[in-house]
Amino acid sequence: MKFLTSLLAGMLILVAGQAAAVGFQTTTVPDPADRPIEIGIWYPSDAPVPVGPNTPFRQTLAVNGALAGDCLPLVIISHGKGGWLGAHADTALALAQAGFVVVAPTHTGDNGEDESSPPAKWMVDRPRHLSRVLDYMLAAWSGHGHLDAGRIGVFGFSAGGYTALVVIGGEPDLRAAADHCARDPAELTCLLGMASAFSGSEAAPTWHHDARIKAAVVAAPGLGFAFTAKALARVTAPVQLWAASQDRNVPPASNSDIVRLALGTRAEFHLVDGPGHFVFRPPCRPELEAALPKVWIMACVDPPGFDRAAFHRQFNADVVAYFAGTLRAN
């Protein structure tokens, strides 16, 4: 089943040619509070690469190749609901080609193979996962001595955008969330139970923050309506915030616009005109249309004339430039 899921997930991604050698590893991170966390790591490497693609996401990488460089910045990627560590492989690759080390966890209990965790668990666990993975990367990973612990960023999409906002200091306003869902119960995050996850709890959840993260890129954040000015008051890290104008899953008016106003000058905002929620995922491989037509329609079809491959070239360049600017070496 795991091989089949990886194969189908890889079919979602059509990756352009690579400009520089990049190494790649997969491993697991021990989690004393739960099962081990599976991670993928992209990093600069001078190791030779094979002729053709050798990964489930169709990239040609130096698997387990030697790490090249010192004092390297680190970016951690948090996927959306139903995603996995390869969900944003093209962005990870672009960052690694630019000299970043990138680590992407598959969130335990909230991924395409395992959705066993209810919202009240994964909403708390996801930010904690990021810190646990950072602990591993900075102390136990074989290349930890080549990392600059003062230059760490986070990239998050959808539920991963929610995760990124929490880990940099956000504390969702659950009352605002409940009020919004009472007015608009059909919004996806309301249907998923995110706004009501902690109703009836005697104690408020303990949100996990990590001050080691110095910058964030947040795309189409889920539960955005809960991130009021008060909810984001503790956020000091700069944020590059993205939204798609025709996003039906997390409509900009009730999500990214709320976050943008709450962050004020801390946010650099980009609105992508025309496409929907999944535009921040890489272009799909053509064979997915016949293999999984419903997934194709949901996640792969953009408005006529919109070129997702061209958009991702610019999107990835903008993400790289933002992290390069906000995570500059001292």
Image: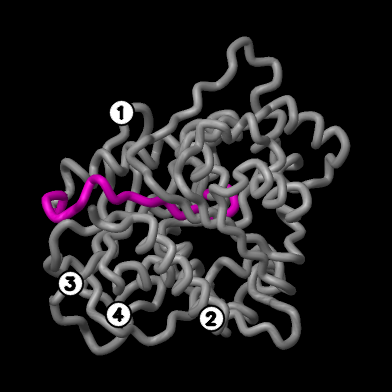
- Tell me the element at label 3: loop
Q: Which mark is residue 45?
A: 3
Q: Distance between the Cα atoms at labels 4 and 3?
A: 12 Å
Q: Earlier in the sequence, mark 2 or mark 4?
A: 4
Pick the residue in front: 227 or 58: 227
Marker count (numbered): 4
In this view of the protein, can residue 40 be seen by the observer? no
The residue labelled by disc 4 is 60
Q: Earlier in the sequence, mark 2 or mark 1?
A: 1
In this view of the protein, can residue 173 be seen by the observer? yes
In magenta segment, residue 277: no
The residue labelled by disc 2 is 285
Pick the residue in front: 262 or 310: 262
- Nearer to us of marks 3 and 1 is 3
Q: Distance between the Cα atoms at labels 2 and 3?
A: 27 Å
Q: Residue at x 80, y 36 (%)?
A: 181
Q: Is residue 96 left or right of residue 217?
A: left
Name which residue type carries label 1: Pro
Name which residue type carries label 3: Ser
Q: Quadrant of residue 226?
A: top right
Q: Earlier in the sequence, mark 1 or mark 4?
A: 1
Which span of residues is magenta-colored?
143-160
Residue 287, x across and y down, in percent: 56, 83
Q: Earlier in the sequence, mark 4 or mark 3?
A: 3
The residue labelled by disc 1 is 32
Crowd band around label 1 with a 10 angstrom C-alpha radius: few (<14), some (14–19), many (20+): few
Asked whether the beta carbons under mark 2 and mark 3 sit within 8 Å of each other, the answer is no
